[in-house]
Structures are given as structure tokens and as C-alpha cells.
Image (spheres, rainbow, N blue to C red):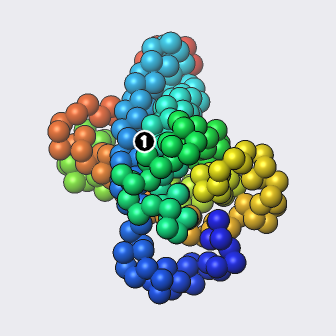
Amino acid sequence: MQVNPDKYKSIGNGFAVTLREDGVRGLAKGWAPTFIGYSMQGLCKFGFYEVFKILYSDLLGEENTYLWRTSLYLAASASAEFFADIALAPMEAAKVRIQTQPGYANTLRECAPKMYAEEGLWAFYKGVAPLWMRQIPYTMMKFACFERTVELLYKYVVPKPRSECSKPEQLVVTFTAGYIACTVNSNHFSGVFCAIVSHPADSVVSVLNKEKGSTAMQVLKRLGPKGVWKGLIARIIMIGTLTALQWFIYDSVKVYFRLPRPPPPEMPESLKKKLGLTE
């Protein structure tokens, strides 16, 4: 819908055309670069988020970490996504070529050498800047919203501290927070809003990786104000499902392997004394 709106007019029409032309296999085109690329991105995104959260927390100190925790989540997630997109960019470029250029290549093994022969290394990284524009705002909202939603759920909804909750109960909270993070959270951000904010850059990434010799600004001008919004509903549906499952799987793995899972943040005793909240 983003790169050929005349052919793929809607979600339903897009499915119908794809199935008619390529059968069920057409829906799985580009699965290998998607699997590899988003696995690498997920590794960097969630892994570096934990690293940067600890790094920035140590720089701020205990009291400021609590007071500025939302800003901490935003900064740590933005830093993590910067590196995650560098890992994702080559596979994203290959995926778009396979999906949007019929006859160009059917597999990653066929596509990658062909792209390198035509444009060199640039073919794999020319979309990294719009990828940052697409992914960094999305990830900042996703992580900050999730962290604050977990905090609010344990504070106002769950009737007992997390330390007293069983592992299944904790995972229910995680899944609920993940779902809220990607649909509606009136206190902070909306995953739907996040998809809307990042969608123009997503359209540019798709077209840029399909074509040779274009720049991001050239693609943006050619798409125009209406063209950049093609495929928005499909992307919102995808992001909603994806985000909730990501958080559930991420926390399930931490629970299964008994990895450290810090409790929801509490105001440090030293700050309580400064604010006169304790005797």
C-alpha cells in the first residue's frame, strides 16, 4: 500500500491481490530478513535499554533517578534504539526489495549479493536515517508508557506488592501493561499516536529501500502530504499486537531464567525525609 497504492487499495484488497498473484507463499515473502533483522533489533533494543537505564541512573543518583524516571526511560530507550536500528537497517532494506520488486529476488541469499553488486554497502544503510525517525519516537513512547503503566497498575489496581504476587500474576500485569502501552494510556502516551507519529518515516523507508538513487527528501517530496499516510491502519493493527506480545515474551524470558527484575520504583528514604514525608 505504501509503494504501490494504485495496485493495493486497502488492507482487504491487498490480501486478495497478493493471494491471487502469489498464493499463500506471497504473504511470507521476505520472512528471512524480517526474522534476522528484527531478532537483531530486539536484542539491541531490549539489551541496551537495560544497560543505558543503569548507566543513566548511576549518573543521576538515587533521588534524581526517581524524580526524573520518565525522562530516564525516554533517554535510555532512545539510546538503545539508535544502535538497534543500525543492526536492523540491512535486513529491512533487503526485506523491502524482496516484497516490493517482483522478480528482483525471492530469497535473502539471492537478494543481498545483488544489492551489494549494484549499490555497494550504501544499499543496506541508505534508509537508516528515516529508520531512526520512525523507530526512536515509537520506542521512546513504548518503553516510557510501559514502565509507568506497570508502576500505576501495582499502585492502584493490584491489591498486593509485586514481591507477594506469583509469577503468573506478574505476567498478567506485564501483558496488561504492554497492551495498554500500545493502545491507550491517558496519563502518558498512546501506541496508536506513536504509530501515527512515526508512519511518514515508515513510508519513506519503504519507498527508499525499493528504489535506487533516491534520497529521503526526494521521496518525501514525491509522496506528498497524503502519500505518507498510506497503510496507516495496517501498521496500527500490526504494532498493537506486536508490542503487547513483545513485552509478554520479554518478561516471560526474564521470569523463566530468573533474571533480575527490579520492583516498581519507590521514593528513596532520603527524599522522603527532605520532603517531610517521614518523621
Residue 133 in view = yes
Q: Residue at x 59, y 52 (%)?
A: 209
| Residue located beneath label 1 in the image | 41
Quadrant in the rendering for residue 78? top right
Q: Amino acid at mark 1?
A: Gln
Q: Residue at x 53, y 29 (%)?
A: 79
Residue 211 x %, y %: 64, 55
Vertical comparison of 55 with 74: above or below: above
Residue 45 x %, y %: 43, 37
Q: Residues within 10 Å of mark 1 (few under 14, many from 20)?
A: many
Along the horizontal axis of the image, is 251 left or right of 51?
left
Q: Residue at x 34, y 34 (%)?
A: 263
> Residue furthest toward the left?
257
Frontmost residue, 252 versus 205: 205
Vertical comparison of 157 with 56: above or below: below
Q: Residue at x 82, y 54 (%)?
A: 221
Vertical comparison of 101 with 62: above or below: below
Residue 264 in view = no
Residue 262 x %, y %: 33, 31
